Amino acid sequence: MGITRSFFIALSNNRLLNSGAKKWGFQLGAAKVVAGTDIPNMMASVRALNEDGISATIDRLGEFVTSREEATQAKNEIIQTAEAITEAGVDAHLSVKLTQIGLDIDEQFCLENIREIAAEAEQRRIYVNLDMENYEHLQPTLDILHTLREEFDSVGTVIQAYLFRSEQDLDALQNVRLRLVKGAYQESEQVAYQSAEEVDSNFLKLIKLRLDQPVFTSIATHDHHIINAAIDYVKEQGIPNDRFEFQMLYGFRTDLLKELSEEYQVTSYVPFGKDWYGYFMRRLAERPQNIQLVLKGALSKSS
Protein backbone atom coordinates (compact mmCIF):
# COMPACT_ATOMS: atom_id res chain seq x y z
CA MET A 1 0.00 0.00 0.00
CA GLY A 2 1.45 3.34 -1.05
CA ILE A 3 2.11 6.13 1.37
CA THR A 4 -0.47 8.35 -0.36
CA ARG A 5 -3.28 5.86 0.21
CA SER A 6 -2.22 5.35 3.83
CA PHE A 7 -2.17 9.12 4.30
CA PHE A 8 -5.74 9.63 3.09
CA ILE A 9 -7.06 6.66 5.08
CA ALA A 10 -5.47 8.15 8.19
CA LEU A 11 -7.17 11.46 7.43
CA SER A 12 -10.54 9.72 7.00
CA ASN A 13 -10.24 8.36 10.55
CA ASN A 14 -9.42 11.74 12.12
CA ARG A 15 -12.35 12.80 14.28
CA LEU A 16 -11.10 16.38 14.69
CA LEU A 17 -10.87 16.94 10.95
CA ASN A 18 -14.27 15.31 10.44
CA SER A 19 -15.77 17.74 12.94
CA GLY A 20 -14.03 20.65 11.27
CA ALA A 21 -15.28 19.61 7.85
CA LYS A 22 -18.88 20.06 9.02
CA LYS A 23 -18.02 23.66 9.95
CA TRP A 24 -16.17 24.36 6.70
CA GLY A 25 -19.20 23.37 4.70
CA PHE A 26 -19.62 21.39 1.51
CA GLN A 27 -16.42 22.26 -0.32
CA LEU A 28 -12.92 20.95 -1.14
CA GLY A 29 -14.29 19.22 -4.23
CA ALA A 30 -16.60 16.88 -2.32
CA ALA A 31 -19.61 18.04 -4.34
CA LYS A 32 -18.20 16.10 -7.28
CA VAL A 33 -18.60 12.78 -5.49
CA VAL A 34 -21.27 13.48 -2.84
CA ALA A 35 -24.83 14.16 -4.06
CA GLY A 36 -25.65 17.04 -1.76
CA THR A 37 -26.05 17.50 1.96
CA ASP A 38 -29.82 16.96 2.19
CA ILE A 39 -32.55 14.70 0.81
CA PRO A 40 -34.00 17.14 -1.80
CA ASN A 41 -30.62 17.75 -3.44
CA MET A 42 -29.77 14.06 -3.34
CA MET A 43 -33.11 13.10 -4.90
CA ALA A 44 -32.51 15.52 -7.76
CA SER A 45 -29.25 13.69 -8.47
CA VAL A 46 -31.01 10.32 -8.35
CA ARG A 47 -33.67 11.49 -10.81
CA ALA A 48 -30.93 12.60 -13.20
CA LEU A 49 -29.27 9.19 -12.93
CA ASN A 50 -32.56 7.42 -13.58
CA GLU A 51 -33.06 9.50 -16.71
CA ASP A 52 -29.78 8.04 -17.99
CA GLY A 53 -30.91 4.49 -17.23
CA ILE A 54 -28.93 4.26 -14.00
CA SER A 55 -30.38 2.99 -10.73
CA ALA A 56 -29.14 4.25 -7.35
CA THR A 57 -28.22 2.91 -3.95
CA ILE A 58 -28.44 5.75 -1.46
CA ASP A 59 -26.10 6.16 1.50
CA ARG A 60 -26.89 8.71 4.19
CA LEU A 61 -23.35 9.51 5.32
CA GLY A 62 -22.40 9.44 8.99
CA GLU A 63 -19.31 8.50 10.98
CA PHE A 64 -17.95 8.66 14.52
CA VAL A 65 -21.41 8.20 16.04
CA THR A 66 -20.96 7.96 19.79
CA SER A 67 -24.37 8.76 21.24
CA ARG A 68 -27.80 7.17 21.06
CA GLU A 69 -29.22 10.52 20.06
CA GLU A 70 -26.97 10.71 16.97
CA ALA A 71 -27.76 7.10 16.06
CA THR A 72 -31.49 7.65 16.43
CA GLN A 73 -31.32 10.77 14.28
CA ALA A 74 -29.45 8.82 11.60
CA LYS A 75 -32.04 6.04 11.71
CA ASN A 76 -34.86 8.56 11.32
CA GLU A 77 -33.17 10.25 8.37
CA ILE A 78 -32.63 6.89 6.66
CA ILE A 79 -36.33 6.13 7.09
CA GLN A 80 -37.09 9.58 5.66
CA THR A 81 -34.91 8.65 2.70
CA ALA A 82 -36.99 5.51 2.14
CA GLU A 83 -40.12 7.65 2.25
CA ALA A 84 -38.59 10.05 -0.29
CA ILE A 85 -37.77 7.17 -2.65
CA THR A 86 -41.42 6.10 -2.63
CA GLU A 87 -42.80 9.62 -2.94
CA ALA A 88 -40.51 10.47 -5.86
CA GLY A 89 -41.05 7.12 -7.54
CA VAL A 90 -37.36 6.77 -8.33
CA ASP A 91 -35.40 3.59 -9.01
CA ALA A 92 -33.30 3.37 -5.87
CA HIS A 93 -32.58 1.38 -2.72
CA LEU A 94 -30.74 1.95 0.57
CA SER A 95 -27.19 1.34 1.73
CA VAL A 96 -26.68 1.56 5.50
CA LYS A 97 -23.53 1.57 7.63
CA LEU A 98 -24.32 0.03 10.98
CA THR A 99 -21.85 2.20 12.88
CA GLN A 100 -23.98 5.27 12.15
CA ILE A 101 -27.01 3.68 13.79
CA GLY A 102 -25.29 2.51 16.95
CA LEU A 103 -23.07 -0.52 16.32
CA ASP A 104 -20.22 1.00 18.36
CA ILE A 105 -22.61 1.96 21.15
CA ASP A 106 -24.61 -1.22 21.73
CA GLU A 107 -25.19 -4.09 19.30
CA GLN A 108 -28.76 -4.74 20.47
CA PHE A 109 -29.59 -1.04 20.14
CA CYS A 110 -28.16 -1.10 16.61
CA LEU A 111 -30.19 -4.20 15.77
CA GLU A 112 -33.38 -2.48 16.90
CA ASN A 113 -32.58 0.51 14.68
CA ILE A 114 -31.78 -1.50 11.56
CA ARG A 115 -34.82 -3.70 12.15
CA GLU A 116 -36.99 -0.58 12.10
CA ILE A 117 -35.34 0.56 8.88
CA ALA A 118 -35.74 -2.88 7.29
CA ALA A 119 -39.41 -3.06 8.25
CA GLU A 120 -40.10 0.36 6.71
CA ALA A 121 -38.15 -0.56 3.58
CA GLU A 122 -39.90 -3.91 3.16
CA GLN A 123 -43.29 -2.21 3.39
CA ARG A 124 -42.15 0.07 0.56
CA ARG A 125 -40.49 -2.78 -1.39
CA ILE A 126 -37.06 -1.20 -1.05
CA TYR A 127 -33.95 -3.35 -0.77
CA VAL A 128 -31.54 -2.59 2.12
CA ASN A 129 -27.82 -3.25 1.83
CA LEU A 130 -25.68 -3.37 4.97
CA ASP A 131 -22.45 -1.68 3.97
CA MET A 132 -19.29 -3.41 5.15
CA GLU A 133 -16.84 -1.32 7.10
CA ASN A 134 -13.43 -2.19 8.53
CA TYR A 135 -12.44 -5.64 9.78
CA GLU A 136 -13.36 -4.84 13.37
CA HIS A 137 -17.00 -4.48 12.31
CA LEU A 138 -17.18 -7.37 9.86
CA GLN A 139 -18.40 -10.16 12.14
CA PRO A 140 -20.85 -7.98 14.09
CA THR A 141 -22.32 -6.84 10.76
CA LEU A 142 -22.72 -10.44 9.58
CA ASP A 143 -24.26 -11.42 12.91
CA ILE A 144 -26.87 -8.69 12.57
CA LEU A 145 -27.48 -9.64 8.95
CA HIS A 146 -28.22 -13.25 9.92
CA THR A 147 -30.68 -12.05 12.58
CA LEU A 148 -32.42 -9.72 10.12
CA ARG A 149 -32.69 -12.47 7.51
CA GLU A 150 -34.91 -14.39 9.90
CA GLU A 151 -37.51 -11.64 9.39
CA PHE A 152 -36.69 -9.90 6.10
CA ASP A 153 -35.73 -11.29 2.70
CA SER A 154 -34.74 -8.03 1.04
CA VAL A 155 -31.60 -7.40 3.08
CA GLY A 156 -28.03 -8.11 1.98
CA THR A 157 -24.46 -7.00 2.48
CA VAL A 158 -20.98 -6.58 1.00
CA ILE A 159 -18.03 -8.92 0.47
CA GLN A 160 -14.58 -7.28 0.36
CA ALA A 161 -12.13 -9.12 -1.90
CA TYR A 162 -8.99 -8.05 -0.06
CA LEU A 163 -9.87 -10.12 3.01
CA PHE A 164 -8.62 -13.70 3.31
CA ARG A 165 -11.94 -14.91 4.72
CA SER A 166 -14.10 -13.53 1.92
CA GLU A 167 -14.44 -16.76 -0.05
CA GLN A 168 -15.67 -18.49 3.11
CA ASP A 169 -18.15 -15.66 3.75
CA LEU A 170 -19.30 -15.81 0.14
CA ASP A 171 -20.04 -19.50 0.51
CA ALA A 172 -22.00 -18.88 3.72
CA LEU A 173 -24.14 -16.21 2.04
CA GLN A 174 -25.15 -18.10 -1.10
CA ASN A 175 -28.82 -17.15 -0.82
CA VAL A 176 -28.23 -13.49 0.05
CA ARG A 177 -28.02 -10.60 -2.38
CA LEU A 178 -24.45 -9.28 -2.25
CA ARG A 179 -22.25 -6.45 -3.47
CA LEU A 180 -18.68 -7.50 -4.30
CA VAL A 181 -15.95 -4.87 -3.88
CA LYS A 182 -12.17 -4.75 -3.63
CA GLY A 183 -12.19 -3.04 -0.21
CA ALA A 184 -11.53 0.53 0.92
CA TYR A 185 -10.00 0.26 4.40
CA GLN A 186 -6.43 -0.31 5.56
CA GLU A 187 -6.19 -3.82 7.03
CA SER A 188 -3.24 -5.76 8.40
CA GLU A 189 -1.36 -8.49 6.57
CA GLN A 190 -2.81 -10.94 9.11
CA VAL A 191 -6.30 -10.59 7.61
CA ALA A 192 -5.94 -9.05 4.15
CA TYR A 193 -4.02 -9.21 0.90
CA GLN A 194 -1.63 -6.29 0.61
CA SER A 195 -0.79 -6.11 -3.09
CA ALA A 196 -3.10 -4.87 -5.83
CA GLU A 197 -2.35 -7.97 -7.88
CA GLU A 198 -3.50 -10.31 -5.12
CA VAL A 199 -6.63 -8.28 -4.46
CA ASP A 200 -7.55 -8.17 -8.17
CA SER A 201 -6.98 -11.91 -8.54
CA ASN A 202 -9.19 -12.73 -5.57
CA PHE A 203 -11.82 -10.22 -6.66
CA LEU A 204 -12.18 -11.85 -10.07
CA LYS A 205 -12.25 -15.29 -8.46
CA LEU A 206 -15.08 -14.25 -6.14
CA ILE A 207 -17.00 -12.66 -9.01
CA LYS A 208 -16.90 -15.88 -11.00
CA LEU A 209 -17.86 -18.02 -8.01
CA ARG A 210 -20.76 -15.73 -7.28
CA LEU A 211 -22.00 -15.47 -10.86
CA ASP A 212 -22.29 -19.26 -10.88
CA GLN A 213 -24.95 -18.93 -8.18
CA PRO A 214 -28.58 -18.12 -9.13
CA VAL A 215 -28.84 -15.04 -6.90
CA PHE A 216 -28.47 -11.34 -7.67
CA THR A 217 -25.00 -9.80 -7.38
CA SER A 218 -23.64 -6.26 -7.66
CA ILE A 219 -20.14 -6.10 -9.14
CA ALA A 220 -18.87 -2.82 -7.73
CA THR A 221 -15.71 -1.54 -9.38
CA HIS A 222 -14.36 1.16 -11.67
CA ASP A 223 -11.65 -1.18 -12.96
CA HIS A 224 -12.40 -1.77 -16.64
CA HIS A 225 -10.09 -4.80 -16.66
CA ILE A 226 -12.24 -6.48 -14.01
CA ILE A 227 -15.44 -5.37 -15.74
CA ASN A 228 -14.31 -6.75 -19.11
CA ALA A 229 -13.25 -10.04 -17.52
CA ALA A 230 -16.64 -10.33 -15.82
CA ILE A 231 -18.44 -9.64 -19.11
CA ASP A 232 -16.34 -12.28 -20.86
CA TYR A 233 -17.23 -14.81 -18.16
CA VAL A 234 -20.93 -13.94 -18.34
CA LYS A 235 -20.95 -14.50 -22.08
CA GLU A 236 -18.91 -17.71 -21.90
CA GLN A 237 -21.18 -19.22 -19.26
CA GLY A 238 -24.45 -17.88 -20.67
CA ILE A 239 -25.31 -16.11 -17.41
CA PRO A 240 -28.51 -14.04 -17.79
CA ASN A 241 -28.14 -10.27 -17.46
CA ASP A 242 -30.90 -10.06 -14.85
CA ARG A 243 -28.71 -11.93 -12.34
CA PHE A 244 -26.15 -9.16 -11.87
CA GLU A 245 -25.38 -5.47 -12.22
CA PHE A 246 -22.34 -3.24 -12.42
CA GLN A 247 -22.09 -0.65 -9.69
CA MET A 248 -19.91 2.45 -9.43
CA LEU A 249 -19.52 5.35 -7.04
CA TYR A 250 -21.37 8.56 -7.77
CA GLY A 251 -19.18 10.96 -9.72
CA PHE A 252 -16.69 8.35 -10.93
CA ARG A 253 -16.44 7.00 -14.50
CA THR A 254 -19.95 8.13 -15.35
CA ASP A 255 -19.34 7.73 -19.08
CA LEU A 256 -18.40 4.07 -18.61
CA LEU A 257 -21.46 3.48 -16.46
CA LYS A 258 -23.71 5.01 -19.12
CA GLU A 259 -22.03 2.86 -21.76
CA LEU A 260 -22.62 -0.28 -19.71
CA SER A 261 -26.25 0.70 -19.15
CA GLU A 262 -26.95 0.12 -22.84
CA GLU A 263 -26.64 -3.64 -22.28
CA TYR A 264 -26.49 -4.32 -18.54
CA GLN A 265 -28.15 -3.27 -15.32
CA VAL A 266 -26.14 -0.52 -13.63
CA THR A 267 -26.31 1.32 -10.32
CA SER A 268 -24.62 4.38 -8.88
CA TYR A 269 -23.68 4.43 -5.19
CA VAL A 270 -25.07 7.81 -4.14
CA PRO A 271 -23.81 9.25 -0.84
CA PHE A 272 -25.27 12.39 0.68
CA GLY A 273 -25.28 14.30 3.95
CA LYS A 274 -23.27 16.70 6.05
CA ASP A 275 -20.84 14.02 7.25
CA TRP A 276 -19.09 13.79 3.89
CA TYR A 277 -15.49 14.16 5.09
CA GLY A 278 -14.52 10.56 5.93
CA TYR A 279 -16.16 9.19 2.78
CA PHE A 280 -14.38 11.77 0.64
CA MET A 281 -10.97 10.96 2.14
CA ARG A 282 -11.44 7.22 1.47
CA ARG A 283 -12.27 7.96 -2.15
CA LEU A 284 -9.01 9.90 -2.43
CA ALA A 285 -7.24 6.97 -0.78
CA GLU A 286 -8.61 4.57 -3.38
CA ARG A 287 -7.70 6.84 -6.28
CA PRO A 288 -5.02 9.32 -5.07
CA GLN A 289 -5.01 11.02 -8.49
CA ASN A 290 -8.33 12.49 -7.41
CA ILE A 291 -6.38 14.95 -5.31
CA GLN A 292 -7.15 17.23 -8.28
CA LEU A 293 -10.72 17.36 -6.96
CA VAL A 294 -9.42 18.98 -3.80
CA LEU A 295 -7.30 21.43 -5.74
CA LYS A 296 -10.16 22.42 -8.03
CA GLY A 297 -12.45 22.86 -5.03
CA ALA A 298 -9.92 25.04 -3.23
CA LEU A 299 -9.25 27.12 -6.33
CA SER A 300 -12.94 27.68 -6.95
CA LYS A 301 -13.34 28.89 -3.36
CA SER A 302 -10.51 31.39 -3.71
CA SER A 303 -11.57 32.73 -7.13
Image (spheres, grey):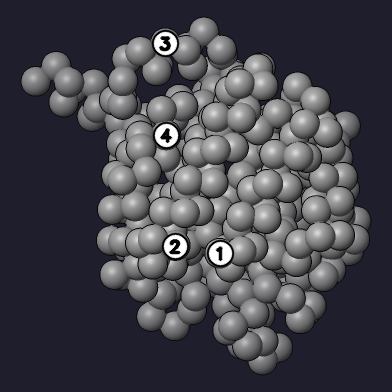
- Label 3: few (<14), some or many (≥20) within 10 Å? few
- Label 4: few (<14), some or many (≥20) within 10 Å? many
Residue under the image location 9 percent in, 20 percent down? 303
Q: In the displayed structure, would residue 291 be above or below residue 20?
A: below
C-alpha distance separating marks 4 and 3 = 15 Å
Where's residue 99, x and y in %? Answer: 68, 31
User: Is residue 170 visible in the rendered structure shown here?
Assistant: no
State the SS at label 2.
helix
State the SS at label 4.
loop
State the SS at label 1.
loop
The tag earlier along the polypeptide, 2 or 1, is: 2
Residue bearing mark 4: 273
Kind of residue indicated by mark 3: Gly
Label at residue 20: 3
Residue bearing mark 1: 124
C-alpha distance separating marks 4 and 1 = 22 Å
Where's residue 169, x and y in %? Answer: 86, 55
* Observer-nearest of 123 and 106: 123
* Observer-nearest of 125 and 208: 125
Residue bearing mark 2: 86
C-alpha distance separating marks 2 and 3 = 34 Å
Contact check, label 1 and label 3, Cβ < 8 Å: no
The tag earlier along the polypeptide, 2 or 4, is: 2
